[in-house]
Amino acid sequence: MTTERPDSPCIAVCSTAVGDDICRGCARSFDEISQWCFMDAEERELVWLQLPLRQRGLKIAAVFSCLPELHQGEDGGEWMSVPCLPLWFRMEGNCLHWLRAGEPACQRDCAGWSPAQVAAFLREQAGVE
């Protein structure tokens, strides 16, 4: 089953030109934006699949008044971090995953939680006031 998509996720609210790791508009990384026209359909689809998760991460980071940074985990998954927390996090469906350096990942169902509730929970897990 193929999904009909626009040519690009761009919504003309670009922010990577000002140094953001993740575009506030489309949620792609600078590399993904700059390489988009060179990607094949499979590579583009992988990016499309990440965008809803990144959008949620952008909303969570906005509660901290900052933008998230992207990281590739040892598990091959994509993680986000914000400067004020000593941990990485990611959303998979309604499940929040977080980890600290050198520790195993933890997870919690957060179905129905707002970005502010997720941020407060992450702050608590990090031991940050």
Image (tube, rainbow, N blue to C red):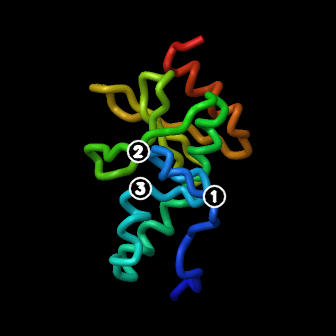
> Looking at the image, is mark 1 or mark 2 earlier in the sequence?
1
Question: Which residue has dot 2 on it?
Answer: 70
Q: Is residue 54 visible?
A: no
Q: Which residue is mark 1?
A: 13
Q: CA distance from mark 2 to mark 3?
A: 11 Å
Q: Look at the numbered disc 1 and give the secondary structure of its residue.
A: loop
Residue for point 49% across, 37% down: 107
Left or right: residue 7 compared with residue 42: right
Give how far apart the Cα atoms at labels 1 and 3 are: 13 Å
Up-down: is 33 above or below 37?
A: above
Circle 1 residues within 10 Å: few <14, some 14–19, many ≥20:
few
The residue that label 3 is drawn on is 30
Q: Residues within 10 Å of mark 3 (few under 14, many from 20)?
A: some
Residue at left 31%, top 44%? 73
Who comes first in sequence, dot 1 or dot 3? Answer: 1
Q: In the image, which disc is placed on residue 33?
A: none
Answer whether residue 79 is visible to the viewer in this image. yes
Looking at marks 2 and 3 on the same chain, the residue that comes earlier in the sequence is marked by: 3
Query: Relative to 42, is 77 above or below?
Result: above
Q: Secondary structure at mark 3?
A: helix
Q: Tell me if residue 28 comes above or below residue 82 in the rendering.
A: below
Q: Position of residue 112 (x, y in %)?
A: 73, 45
